[in-house]
Amino acid sequence: MNAALHAVPNPPDAEPIAAPKKSILIVDDEENVRNALRRSLRKEGYTLHFAEGPAVALEMLKHTPVDLVVSDHMMPQMSGIDFLTLVRDRYPDMVRLMVTGHADLETAIKAINHGEIHRFLTKPWDDMELKVTLFLAFERQDLERENRKLIAQVRRQQIFIGAIEREHPGLMQVLRDKSGAIVLGDEELAQLQTENG
């Protein structure tokens, strides 16, 4: 049997494998906002990265693995919507949040439609709301990643089963009665009796 198709469970007495720390990139042109977010999140166990603008952030993303980006909207070089749209195009798995002091309905709609942001927060933010938002965003990201892995595994198994079926036609066909029990034909019963002597 193909070992790549089967997951080996941890033994019951094994220590659980620790998940890697989640990494956040905070992009804001105001140093006091970056520092405030640093203070809010420093004890949450995240790896925090900071950029003073979209250009620095985009360069950083080329070399630094990041799970989630938090961006201001009103920045001098590029708007947060334009930046998060680029992030979505280049790193579709990365969760995107926007924090802005200039919230209006049009900005929120553009951020959602163009940048496909996970959440839109206003300044000043509530620390608890920010922490809950990050927790839920990471939980959703983990579920989406796990879902993609499971779909890939199912596809590999379907290919494997298809190959077996082509090599041994009819092998995967099983007759069942109304209760779900497997029904054996005369040939199968004779073969079982011969094998069991």
Image (cartoon, rainbow, N blue to C red):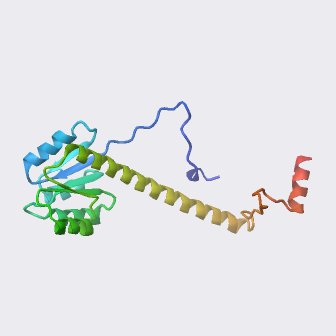
Decide if residue 102 is on the left or right side of residue 151.
Answer: left
Q: Residue at x 77, y 61 (%)?
A: 178
The x, y position of residue 29, in whole percent, is 9, 54
The x, y position of residue 66, in whole percent, is 28, 51
Q: In which image quadrant can residue 61 be found? A: bottom left
Decide if residue 84 is on the left or right side of residue 185.
Answer: left
Q: Residue at x 24, y 54 (%)?
A: 69
The x, y position of residue 105, in whole percent, is 18, 66
Residue 20 to residue 118: above or below:
above
Pick whichever, 109 or 170, lies toward us. Answer: 109
The x, y position of residue 22, in whole percent, is 31, 45
Residue 99 to residue 32: above or below:
below
Decide if residue 60 is on the left or right side of residue 186.
Answer: left
User: Count the marks: how many?
Assistant: 0
Q: Residue at x 44, y 37 (%)?
A: 17
Pick whichever, 119 or 163, lies toward us. Answer: 119
- The residue furthest top is 13
Q: In which image quadrant can residue 97 be found? A: bottom left
